[in-house]
Amino acid sequence: MKKASGRPRRVLVVDVGGTHVKVLVTGAKERRRIDSGHGLTPRRMVREVLRACDGWEFDAVTIGYPGPVNDGRPAAEPPNLGAGWRRFDFAKAFGRPVRIVNDAAMQALGSYDGGRMLFLGLGTGLGSAMVVDGLLVPLELAHLPYRKGRSFEDYVGVAAIEKFGEKEWLLIVADVVAVLSAALLPDYVVIGGGNVRLLKTLPPNARRGDNANAFKGGFALWKS
């Protein structure tokens, strides 16, 4: 397979999570996955992804990374995976052009429906991004102070569900959406992540996201 010149026709999207790495290629109907966890180094991830993708043709790769990304590279090591992500040469390892984006930003791009959209991902922590008139703006809101010297993530991350109880957690989520909406003035909010399933009623002006939108965002990243 040759490297892509110009816009790639077939993109492999790699959504890296703390439990699984999920992959999908342009035109495929079913995603594949490999196990993740504390022992997953970037070299092992690439090796196992390539093995899982046997038979798939692709010209470029998008990686949704579970941490901050700066200038197209991981800016910090992921707390729930192995070491070595910041300095790893993903393009060399895959033998293809690679674009790396925060996983919440990737899902945000795939969830976008025009205007100013704020995306909040309720998972282990709090993922965040905006898309403004088609432009992806990754955010790192999780560790900003919220209440009593603690961060937004401390109040809406997965550990907060057990700490506060589900009923109180739902009220806190609604308040966090209201606070961030007042600050960022989105036209609408998309709430994604694994714990959005707990929200039986969504806050005002909010829509329910879908983890499958991460792949849509990964494909869309190469359309510009």
Image (cartoon, rainbow, N blue to C red):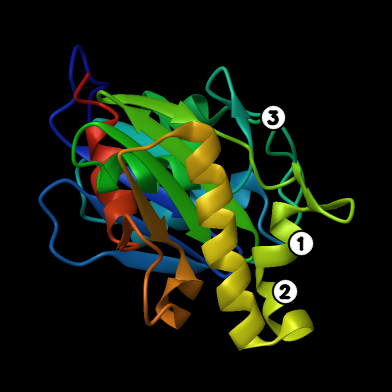
- Location of the N terminus by quadrant is top left
Q: Which residue is mark 2?
A: 160
| Residue 133 falls left or right of residue 142 | left
Question: Residue flagged by tag 2: what amino acid is it?
Answer: Ala
Q: Which residue is mark 1?
A: 154
Q: Which tag is nearer the camera, tag 3 or tag 2?
A: 2
Residue 202 sits above or below residue 130 on the image: below
Question: Residue flagged by tag 3: what amino acid is it?
Answer: Ala
Q: Residue 149: give x, y in percent of width and height.
A: 89, 51
Residue 84 sits above or below residue 32 on the image: above
- Location of the C terminus by quadrant is top left
Q: Real-space Cα distance between discs 3 and 1?
A: 21 Å
Q: Real-space Cα distance between discs 2 and 1?
A: 6 Å
Q: Which residue is mark 3?
A: 75
Q: Residue 103: give x, y in percent of width and height.
A: 48, 46
Q: Real-space Cα distance between discs 3 and 2?
A: 26 Å
Residue 140 sits above or below residue 30 on the image: above
Callout 1 crowding tier (Cα within 10 Å): few <14, some 14–19, many ≥20: many
- Can residue 129 be seen from the camera position used here? yes
Find out whether the residues at labels 2 and 1 contact each other: C-beta distance under 8 Å. Answer: yes
* Among the two numbered marks 2 and 1 on one chain, the one whose residue lies closer to the N terminus: 1
In which quadrant of the rendered view does residue 191 lie?
Answer: bottom left
Element on which disc 1 rests:
helix
| Residue 105 falls left or right of residue 54 | right
